[in-house]
Image (cartoon, rainbow, N blue to C red):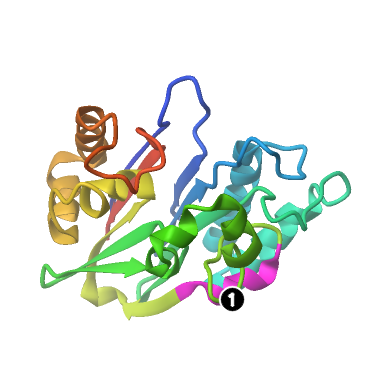
C-alpha cells in the first residue's frame, strides 16, 4: 500500500479546518482513511465555546480510532458513535442544538483483504479507481442540487436547509445524521486506489473545470497530492476577484487530498 497526504490552509493566518488521517491496523491486512472539512462559522456565533478546529480534531480522532479498531461496526455506526462521543465532550458548556454548532463534512474508507467500504457525508468527494482504470466519484450531492438562489440567503439556509429534510446534512451533534450518509461496499479485488478530496481541492474539477475526475486522480497518482493543491492555488490566484467562478465563497479554501493505492 502507498499513501500520500497533503492538507493546506486557505490562508496562512487562519487555522486549517480540515482533518486527514490514514491508519494501518496492527494486523497489516487492511487500512482506513478519514477526511473531514470543518464548516467555517459566521461572525454571529455558533452557541459553542470551541472553535471548528477543536471540534474537527476530536471528531476526526474518534473516527480514526473506531474505523481502524472496530471492524465489527459499520461505517454509519462508527460515524454515529464518534458524533455522540464528541458531543459529550462539550454538551455541558455549549448549546449543541444551535444550527451553527461546529460541524464538518466526512469521508471514511476502510479496506480489508475482502472488501472496500466507504461513507461520504456532504460535499467532499471520494474517487474510486477500479482495476480497469475507470474512476467513479462517490458524492453526496444534496448541497449541489439546491438552487443557488436559496443558498445566497444564509439565514434561510440555517432555518430551512442545514441538517433538514429537503436540504443537506453535515456531522454536528446529532448522531442520527449518520443514516443520511452515502455508503457502499466493493470487492477489494476490484479497487486499485482511492482519493479523498475536500471541496477546496475538488475545485480543480468542480469550479474551474480543468479536467474530469479521472484526470484529477491521474494527476494525484503521477504527480502527487501536492501537485493538485498547487494547481488549485494557481487557478484561484488568477481569478482572485472570482469573476469567472461566482460559486466560490472565498478566494482560497482549505484543501486536503488523501491518496491510497491499495
User: Which quarter shows the N terminus?
Assistant: bottom left
The majority secondary structure of the magenta stretch comes to helix
For this rendering, which residue is in front, 236 or 78? 236
- Residue range corresponding to the magenta coloring: 174-182
Q: How crowded is mark 1: few (under 14 residues within 10 Å), some or many (20 or more)?
A: few
Picture quadrant of residue 125: bottom left
> For numbered disc 1, what is the local secondary structure?
loop
Residue lying farthest to the top in this orientation: 13
Q: Mark 1 points at which residue?
A: 165
For this rendering, which residue is in front, 188 or 41? 41
- Say above or below: 130 vs 241: below
- Say above or below: 212 vs 16: below
Residue depicted at 38% across the width and 69% down the height: 145
Picture quadrant of residue 174: bottom right
- Location of residue 182 in the rendering, given as x and y in whole percent from the top left corner: 45, 74
Q: Does the magenta stretch include residue 1?
A: no
Picture quadrant of residue 146: bottom left
Residue depicted at 53% across the width and 53% down the height: 153
User: Which quarter shows the C terminus?
Assistant: bottom left
- Horizontal side of residue 211 vs 177, given as left or right: left
- Location of residue 21 in the rendering, given as x and y in whole percent from the top left corner: 46, 47
Amino acid at each position: 500500500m502507498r499513501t500520500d497526504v497533503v492538507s493546506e490552509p486557505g490562508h496562512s493566518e487562519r487555522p486549517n479546518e480540515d482533518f486527514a488521517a490514514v491508519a494501518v491496523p496492527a494486523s497489516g491486512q487492511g487500512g482506513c482513511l478519514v477526511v473531514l472539512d470543518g464548516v467555517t462559522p459566521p461572525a454571529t456565533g455558533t452557541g459553542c465555546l470551541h472553535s471548528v478546529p477543536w471540534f474537527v480534531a476530536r471528531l476526526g480522532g474518534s473516527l480514526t480510532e473506531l474505523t481502524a479498531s472496530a471492524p465489527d461496526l459499520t461505517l454509519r455506526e462508527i460515524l454515529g458513535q464518534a458524533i455522540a462521543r464528541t458531543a459529550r465532550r462539550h454538551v455541558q458548556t455549549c448549546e449543541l442544538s444551535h444550527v451553527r454548532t461546529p460541524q464538518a463534512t466526512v469521508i471514511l474508507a476502510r479496506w480489508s483483504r475482502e472488501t472496500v467500504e466507504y461513507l461520504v457525508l456532504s460535499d467532499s468527494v471520494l474517487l474510486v479507481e477500479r482495476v480497469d482504470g475507470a474512476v467513479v466519484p462517490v458524492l453526496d450531492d444534496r448541497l449541489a442540487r439546491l438552487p443557488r438562489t436559496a443558498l445566497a440567503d444564509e439565514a434561510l439556509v440555517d432555518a430551512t436547509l442545514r441538517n433538514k429534510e429537503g436540504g443537506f446534512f453535515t456531522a454536528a451533534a446529532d448522531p442520527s445524521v449518520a443514516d443520511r450518509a452515502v455508503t457502499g461496499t466493493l470487492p477489494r479485488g476490484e479497487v486499485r486506489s482511492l482519493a479523498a478530496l475536500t471541496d477546496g481541492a475538488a475545485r480543480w474539477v468542480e469550479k474551474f473545470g480543468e479536467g474530469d475526475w479521472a484526470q484529477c486522480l491521474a494527476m494525484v497518482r503521477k504527480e502527487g497530492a501536492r501537485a493538485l493543491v498547487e494547481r488549485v492555488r494557481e487557478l484561484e490566484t488568477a481569478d482572485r476577484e472570482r469573476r469567472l467562478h461566482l460559486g466560490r465563497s472565498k478566494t482560497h479554501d482549505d484543501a486536503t487530498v488523501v491518496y491510497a493505492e491499495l
